[in-house]
Image (spheres, rainbow, N blue to C red):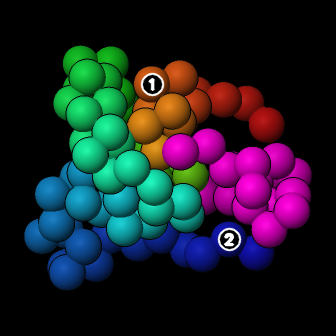
Amino acid sequence: MGKVIQLSEQNAKLEDFDLFWELYPRKKKKGDALKAWKQTESIRPAIEEILAAIQQQERSQQWLKDGGEFIPYPASWLRSWSWADED
């Protein structure tokens, strides 16, 4: 089962991108992810919605398959608006 995401005091002090990076399961190309984060600022929902989407997708067959091999890089996930994916 996916981890329960709660915004503790410690996490609340982190910048939204840092929180996203901390919780996103595939830690690749952080610089590109930060660039995508800035590029999607005007269309991206609140951090709570982003984290909820990650939590839901962590349980998906695509993300579980082959030990997470098919989890998209964070920048790709952001640029493709994957927070809006339905199942």
Report how far apart the C-alphas of labels 1 and 2 lie in the structure. Answer: 23 Å
Q: Position of residue 15 (x, y in %)?
A: 15, 57
Quarter in which the C terminus is drawn:
top right
Residue 64 bears which disc, if any?
A: none
Residue 53 falls left or right of residue 37 = right
- Amino acid type indicated by mark 1: Arg
Residue 79 bears which disc, if any?
A: 1
Residue 72 sits inside the magenta stretch:
yes
Residue 70 falls left or right of residue 74 = right
Q: Position of residue 47 (x, y in %)?
A: 33, 47
Which residue is pictured at 45% across the width and 25% down the height?
Answer: 79
Count the marks: 2
Q: Which is more N-terminal, label 2 or label 1?
A: 2
Residue 71 falls left or right of residue 8 = right
Nearer-the-camera pick, 52 or 62: 62
Q: Bounds of the magenta span?
A: 55-73
Q: Name the residue under label 2.
A: 2
Which residue is pictured at 82% across the width and 47% down the height?
Answer: 62
